[in-house]
Image (cartoon, rainbow, N blue to C red):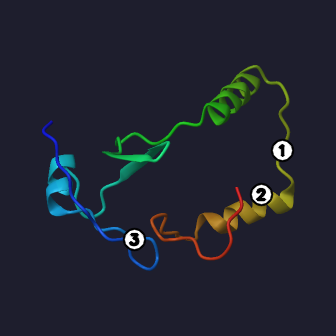
Amino acid sequence: MSSLREVAAIGLQGQVTLPKSIREALGVDCGSKIVFDLSDSHVVVTRADDTSHQDPAIGAFLKLLENDIRNGRHLATLPQALEQALLAAQSESADLSEDIEGHVEL
């Protein structure tokens, strides 16, 4: 890939508009996902893969859970209140692309 250098301003809320030449070079457009990798004081921007991020800890937990279910170990029914709450929430629609409002703690 040839070398490109563009300058963009940061807005009040930390937003940056990628210059057209950069968007075209990355093959991204409105709604596309990009990745920012920070190393020391350098930021590298790349097009995000279509595959979702896989957390190895969650993957290992799900594999353990799958093995337990397959072997009939550590199984129990859900508490009735939780089951009812899950069934009630099932009919609610959610837009997963919406921004989350308020404080989020991970």
Callout 1 amino acid: Thr
Question: Which is nearer the eye, 65 or 81?
Answer: 65
From mark 1 to mark 3, how far is it between C-alphas?
Answer: 47 Å
Q: Secondary structure at mark 2?
A: helix
> Which secondary structure, mark 3?
loop
Where does the image place residue 6, in percent across and percent down from the top left?
Answer: 21, 58
For the view shown, which residue lies furthest in the top direction?
71
Q: Residue at x 75, y 65 (%)?
A: 85
Q: Quadrant of residue 19?
A: bottom left
The residue at the point 67 percent across, 33 percent down is 57
Whether residues under marks 1 and 3 lie with C-beta atoms below 8 angstroms apart, the answer is: no
- Between 9 and 102, the one lying in front of the other is 9
Amino acid at pointer 2: Glu
From the image, which quarter does the N terminus lie in?
Answer: top left
Residue to which mark 1 is pinned: 77
Q: Dot 1 surroundings within 10 Å: few (below 14), some, or many (20 or more)?
A: few
Spatial separation of the CA atoms under disc 2 and disc 1: 9 Å
